[in-house]
Image (cartoon, rainbow, N blue to C red):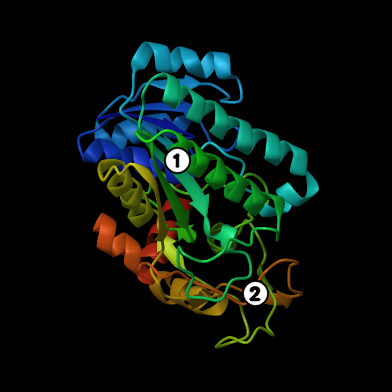
Amino acid sequence: MRILVTGGLGYIGSHTVVCLLRMGHEVIIVDDLTNSQIDVLDKIKTITSIEVPFLRINITNKTQIEKVFHKCGFDGIVHFAGYKSVGESVSNPLAYYFNNLVTTINLAELCLKYQVNRFVFSSSATVYGNGTSPLDESMMLQPRTNPYGETKAMCERILTDTAYANPNFGVTLLRYFNPIGAHSSGLIGEVPNGVPNNLMPYITQVAKGIRKELSVYGNDYPTVDGTGVRDYVHVVDLALGHVAAIENHRKGTSIYNLGTGKGTSVLELVRAFELENGITIPYKFVGRRPGDIAICFADVSKAKKELNWEANLTISDMVRDSWNFEKNR
C-alpha cells in the first residue's frame, strides 16, 4: 500500500516509517519540522536503503496538503502531526487547539474527497485522565487534566463522527502509553527540544553529562517506592502496532491501547538503566507536578485479540537502546 505518514520525521513517526518500509509498503512523509530534524530522512534511508519522498508542509494549510493528495493518491494515512507537550499545552492552549484539531479536520476532509478509507490516528492514554488502571478502551474519557489530552479526545470524536457518517471510512484510534527506546541501529530515537518533557531522554542526558541530575517528581505516591508508575513501551513495538492497524482495516471506528500492560516506577526504570548500562544516575526528589497521577498502565488484551499485536521488547531492551542512541548522537 501507499501510505501517507504525517509527522513522519518525528520520534514515533520515523520508527513507524521504517517498519512500514520493512513490511513492503510505499511511504510518503509530510512534516513541517516543528518537532523533528531533516537529517532523520537520511537516517531512514541508511537503515532501509530506501529513499522516501518528503514534503515540508504544515497541514493546517489545506491547499498545500491537498496538492499532495491530488498528485500522489494514497491507500491510507497514519497521522502523527500534532503538538505533544503537556506543559506547553497548558501555557499555550490556543496553539494546541488550532494545530491539533485543524490538521485532523483537513486530513479527514481530504480522505473523504479522495476516497482514502484507512486512517490511523496517533492518540494517547492522556484521554483517560485520572481513570483507574488497568485502563481499557471502553472507559469513559476524562481528558480535562490538560489541553493536550483534550485535543486528542476531541480529534477522536471528530474522526469517530466522520466514520459514522461515512460508512466506507475506517478509523483506528491508537491510545499509546509511554514510548521509550530507540532503533537498534542507534540512528533514530527521541530528540527533545530544550529541557526534556519525558523521563527517558532526561535520564540519558544525565548519563551523558549534559545534565547534573534527574529530578524525580514526587516520592509519596501510593506505589511500590513512592514514585509514579507508568506503562513504558518500546517505540519499535509501538511502530509495529501502527503497521498492524493500517493493515487490519475495519470500517467504522476501532480503538486500541498500545502498551505492555505492566507498570514500572520511575526508580525502577532508573535502576534498570543503571544495571543494563553500568552508569549511575544521580537524582533528587522534587514536588509532584500538577496533573500527574500515581499509576497508569494499559489493558492491552483488545489489541492482541483483534490486531494480533503485543509488545515483545523488555525494559532492558528499552534502556539499552535509549542509551545507545544518546551516546552516539
Q: Nearer the viewer, mark 2 or mark 1?
A: 1
Q: CA distance from mark 2 to mark 1?
A: 49 Å
Q: Secondary structure at mark 2?
A: strand
For the point 55% across and 40% down, the residue is: 158
Amino acid at the residue labelled 1: Tyr
Res. 179 visible in picture: yes
Residue annotated with mark 1: 164
Horizontal side, residue 80 vs residue 77: left or right: right
Which residue appears farthest toward the right when viewing the image? 91
Q: Is residue 40 left or right of residue 270?
A: left
The reply to whether dot 2 and dot 1 touch (C-beta < 8 Å) is no
Quadrant of res 3: top left
Left or right: 316 in relation to 67 = left
Q: Which disc number belongs to residue 283? A: 2
Q: Name which residue lies at 32% across and 47% down.
A: 245
Relative to the observer, which residue lies in front, 24 or 225? Answer: 24
Query: Circle 2: is it few (<14), some (14-19), or many (20+) Cα within 10 Å?
Result: some
Q: Secondary structure at mark 1?
A: helix
Task: Tell me if residue 130 comes above or below residue 166 in the rendering.
Answer: below
The answer to which of marks 2 and 1 sits earlier in the sequence is 1
